[in-house]
Amino acid sequence: MRLLLVTDWSLGEQRLRLALEQACALGPQVGVQHRHPEAPTRLFLAEARALASLCARYGNPFFVNGRLDVALLVGAHLHLPVDGPTPAEVRPHLPQGRWVSAAVHDEAELDRAAGADLLLLSPVFSPSSKSADGRPTLGREGYARLRARSSCPALALGGIRADRLALLGPLEGAAVQGAVLAAPDPAAAARALLVALAHPGALAEPLLRRW
Protein backbone atom coordinates (compact mmCIF):
# COMPACT_ATOMS: atom_id res chain seq x y z
CA MET A 1 0.00 0.00 0.00
CA ARG A 2 1.37 3.37 -1.02
CA LEU A 3 -1.71 5.58 -1.03
CA LEU A 4 -4.25 5.78 1.80
CA LEU A 5 -7.62 7.49 1.24
CA VAL A 6 -9.21 8.98 4.36
CA THR A 7 -12.99 9.21 3.97
CA ASP A 8 -14.71 12.60 3.89
CA TRP A 9 -18.44 12.07 4.38
CA SER A 10 -19.13 15.79 4.01
CA LEU A 11 -18.85 15.18 0.26
CA GLY A 12 -22.13 13.28 0.45
CA GLU A 13 -22.56 9.53 0.59
CA GLN A 14 -23.18 8.98 -3.13
CA ARG A 15 -20.23 11.06 -4.29
CA LEU A 16 -17.90 9.54 -1.71
CA ARG A 17 -18.83 5.98 -2.54
CA LEU A 18 -18.39 6.60 -6.29
CA ALA A 19 -14.99 8.20 -5.74
CA LEU A 20 -13.85 5.33 -3.53
CA GLU A 21 -15.08 2.76 -6.05
CA GLN A 22 -13.08 4.38 -8.83
CA ALA A 23 -9.89 4.75 -6.78
CA CYS A 24 -10.09 1.34 -5.09
CA ALA A 25 -10.40 -0.34 -8.48
CA LEU A 26 -6.70 0.51 -8.96
CA GLY A 27 -5.91 -2.33 -6.54
CA PRO A 28 -4.07 -2.95 -3.28
CA GLN A 29 -1.66 -0.05 -3.69
CA VAL A 30 -4.65 2.01 -2.54
CA GLY A 31 -5.98 1.66 1.00
CA VAL A 32 -8.99 3.20 2.76
CA GLN A 33 -9.38 4.61 6.26
CA HIS A 34 -12.98 4.99 7.47
CA ARG A 35 -13.21 8.24 9.41
CA HIS A 36 -16.57 9.78 10.32
CA PRO A 37 -16.40 11.29 13.82
CA GLU A 38 -19.86 12.86 13.59
CA ALA A 39 -21.65 9.57 12.84
CA PRO A 40 -23.65 7.69 15.50
CA THR A 41 -22.30 4.24 16.23
CA ARG A 42 -24.89 2.31 14.19
CA LEU A 43 -24.34 4.50 11.14
CA PHE A 44 -20.57 4.30 11.53
CA LEU A 45 -20.82 0.51 11.66
CA ALA A 46 -23.08 0.33 8.60
CA GLU A 47 -20.68 2.52 6.66
CA ALA A 48 -17.74 0.40 7.79
CA ARG A 49 -19.44 -2.78 6.59
CA ALA A 50 -20.08 -1.28 3.17
CA LEU A 51 -16.51 -0.03 2.84
CA ALA A 52 -15.09 -3.35 4.05
CA SER A 53 -17.05 -5.07 1.29
CA LEU A 54 -15.75 -2.62 -1.31
CA CYS A 55 -12.15 -3.07 -0.20
CA ALA A 56 -12.50 -6.86 -0.16
CA ARG A 57 -13.65 -6.73 -3.79
CA TYR A 58 -10.45 -5.04 -4.97
CA GLY A 59 -8.00 -6.24 -2.31
CA ASN A 60 -7.52 -2.84 -0.69
CA PRO A 61 -6.25 -2.60 2.89
CA PHE A 62 -9.05 -1.21 5.07
CA PHE A 63 -8.65 0.67 8.35
CA VAL A 64 -11.27 1.85 10.85
CA ASN A 65 -10.49 5.07 12.68
CA GLY A 66 -10.58 4.95 16.47
CA ARG A 67 -13.15 2.17 16.98
CA LEU A 68 -11.67 -1.16 18.04
CA ASP A 69 -15.14 -2.70 18.35
CA VAL A 70 -16.10 -1.75 14.79
CA ALA A 71 -12.73 -2.87 13.40
CA LEU A 72 -13.25 -6.30 14.99
CA LEU A 73 -16.81 -6.57 13.69
CA VAL A 74 -15.88 -5.86 10.07
CA GLY A 75 -12.44 -7.51 10.00
CA ALA A 76 -10.55 -4.25 9.50
CA HIS A 77 -7.20 -2.91 10.57
CA LEU A 78 -7.28 -0.20 13.24
CA HIS A 79 -6.15 3.43 13.08
CA LEU A 80 -5.48 5.19 16.39
CA PRO A 81 -5.99 8.96 16.70
CA VAL A 82 -3.72 10.86 19.07
CA ASP A 83 -6.32 10.87 21.85
CA GLY A 84 -6.95 7.14 21.59
CA PRO A 85 -5.28 4.15 23.27
CA THR A 86 -1.73 3.21 22.38
CA PRO A 87 -0.74 0.41 19.98
CA ALA A 88 0.51 -1.61 22.97
CA GLU A 89 -2.90 -1.33 24.63
CA VAL A 90 -4.93 -2.51 21.63
CA ARG A 91 -2.57 -5.12 20.22
CA PRO A 92 -3.65 -7.95 22.57
CA HIS A 93 -7.27 -7.50 21.43
CA LEU A 94 -6.57 -7.77 17.69
CA PRO A 95 -6.36 -11.04 15.77
CA GLN A 96 -3.00 -12.00 14.37
CA GLY A 97 -2.28 -10.24 11.10
CA ARG A 98 -4.29 -7.09 11.83
CA TRP A 99 -2.35 -3.86 11.55
CA VAL A 100 -2.33 -0.81 13.76
CA SER A 101 -1.69 2.64 12.34
CA ALA A 102 -1.26 5.72 14.49
CA ALA A 103 -1.50 9.49 14.00
CA VAL A 104 1.66 11.42 14.86
CA HIS A 105 2.26 15.18 14.84
CA ASP A 106 5.36 15.55 17.00
CA GLU A 107 8.09 13.67 18.87
CA ALA A 108 6.00 13.06 22.00
CA GLU A 109 3.25 11.45 19.96
CA LEU A 110 5.84 9.45 18.04
CA ASP A 111 7.09 7.94 21.31
CA ARG A 112 3.51 7.14 22.33
CA ALA A 113 2.91 5.37 19.01
CA ALA A 114 5.65 2.80 19.66
CA GLY A 115 4.63 -0.61 18.38
CA ALA A 116 2.47 0.63 15.50
CA ASP A 117 2.77 -0.99 12.06
CA LEU A 118 2.25 2.27 10.22
CA LEU A 119 2.37 5.98 11.07
CA LEU A 120 0.52 8.93 9.57
CA LEU A 121 2.78 11.96 9.99
CA SER A 122 0.92 15.27 9.71
CA PRO A 123 0.26 17.99 8.86
CA VAL A 124 3.06 18.07 6.31
CA PHE A 125 1.46 20.98 4.46
CA SER A 126 -1.64 23.00 5.32
CA PRO A 127 -4.55 20.52 4.99
CA SER A 128 -7.36 21.75 2.77
CA SER A 129 -9.83 19.55 4.68
CA LYS A 130 -9.05 21.22 8.03
CA SER A 131 -8.84 24.94 7.33
CA ALA A 132 -9.16 25.71 11.06
CA ASP A 133 -6.22 23.48 11.99
CA GLY A 134 -3.84 25.79 13.83
CA ARG A 135 -0.98 23.34 14.23
CA PRO A 136 2.28 24.33 12.53
CA THR A 137 3.03 22.33 9.42
CA LEU A 138 5.93 19.89 9.44
CA GLY A 139 7.24 20.72 5.99
CA ARG A 140 10.02 18.68 4.46
CA GLU A 141 12.36 19.11 7.43
CA GLY A 142 9.78 18.18 10.07
CA TYR A 143 8.57 15.18 8.12
CA ALA A 144 12.13 13.97 7.56
CA ARG A 145 12.95 14.44 11.26
CA LEU A 146 10.00 12.37 12.45
CA ARG A 147 10.48 9.80 9.71
CA ALA A 148 14.12 9.31 10.69
CA ARG A 149 13.03 8.44 14.23
CA SER A 150 10.22 6.12 13.13
CA SER A 151 10.70 2.39 13.53
CA CYS A 152 7.97 1.51 11.00
CA PRO A 153 6.78 2.84 7.63
CA ALA A 154 5.24 6.32 7.64
CA LEU A 155 2.84 8.10 5.32
CA ALA A 156 2.86 11.85 4.71
CA LEU A 157 -0.55 13.43 5.41
CA GLY A 158 -1.85 16.97 5.12
CA GLY A 159 -2.09 19.08 1.98
CA ILE A 160 -0.58 16.31 -0.14
CA ARG A 161 -0.76 16.71 -3.91
CA ALA A 162 1.13 14.94 -6.68
CA ASP A 163 3.12 18.09 -7.50
CA ARG A 164 4.23 18.44 -3.86
CA LEU A 165 5.58 14.95 -3.36
CA ALA A 166 8.92 15.75 -4.96
CA LEU A 167 9.44 18.44 -2.30
CA LEU A 168 9.60 15.76 0.39
CA GLY A 169 12.43 13.73 -1.08
CA PRO A 170 12.48 9.95 -0.42
CA LEU A 171 8.96 8.98 0.53
CA GLU A 172 7.28 5.69 1.42
CA GLY A 173 3.71 6.71 0.78
CA ALA A 174 1.02 9.31 1.31
CA ALA A 175 -2.43 9.68 2.84
CA VAL A 176 -4.95 12.06 1.28
CA GLN A 177 -8.57 13.07 1.44
CA GLY A 178 -9.83 15.75 -0.93
CA ALA A 179 -6.92 15.41 -3.36
CA VAL A 180 -8.54 12.21 -4.61
CA LEU A 181 -12.05 11.99 -3.20
CA ALA A 182 -13.07 15.54 -4.21
CA ALA A 183 -11.31 15.41 -7.57
CA PRO A 184 -13.37 15.51 -10.79
CA ASP A 185 -11.74 12.20 -11.77
CA PRO A 186 -10.77 10.31 -8.57
CA ALA A 187 -9.14 7.45 -10.45
CA ALA A 188 -6.93 9.83 -12.44
CA ALA A 189 -6.01 11.75 -9.28
CA ALA A 190 -5.08 8.54 -7.47
CA ARG A 191 -3.03 7.36 -10.47
CA ALA A 192 -1.15 10.66 -10.55
CA LEU A 193 -0.22 10.27 -6.88
CA LEU A 194 0.86 6.66 -7.36
CA VAL A 195 2.99 7.63 -10.36
CA ALA A 196 4.60 10.45 -8.37
CA LEU A 197 5.31 8.05 -5.49
CA ALA A 198 6.82 5.46 -7.80
CA HIS A 199 9.01 7.93 -9.73
CA PRO A 200 12.72 7.17 -9.40
CA GLY A 201 14.07 9.08 -6.43
CA ALA A 202 10.67 9.61 -4.85
CA LEU A 203 10.74 6.35 -2.91
CA ALA A 204 13.38 5.22 -0.50
CA GLU A 205 12.00 1.64 -0.50
CA PRO A 206 8.66 -0.08 -1.16
CA LEU A 207 6.15 0.50 1.64
CA LEU A 208 5.59 -2.52 3.83
CA ARG A 209 6.81 -5.27 1.49
CA ARG A 210 4.56 -7.76 3.29
CA TRP A 211 1.51 -5.78 2.12
Image: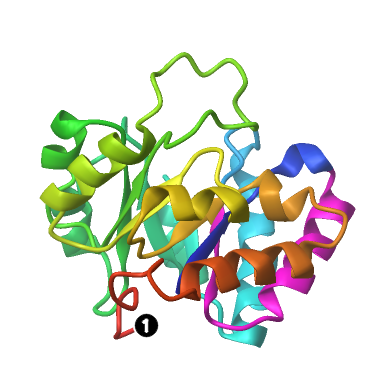
Out of 158 and 42, give the one closest to the viewer.
158
Q: How many marks?
A: 1
Point 36% across, 70% down: residue: 203
Residue 67 visible here: no
Q: Secondary structure at mark 1?
A: loop
Point 14% across, 30% down: residue: 108
Q: Colour scheme used in the picture? A: rainbow
Out of 72 and 6, give the one closest to the viewer.
6
Q: Is residue 65 above or below residue 139?
A: below
Residue assigned mark 1: 211
Picture quadrant where residue 122 is located? top left
Q: Which residues are magenta?
A: 12-34
Residue 206 visible here: yes
Q: Position of residue 93 (x, y in %)?
A: 23, 62
Q: Tell me if 142 is positioned left or right of 18 in this view.
A: left
Q: Tell me if 78 is positioned left or right of 8 in this view.
A: left
Point 22% across, 50% down: residue: 147
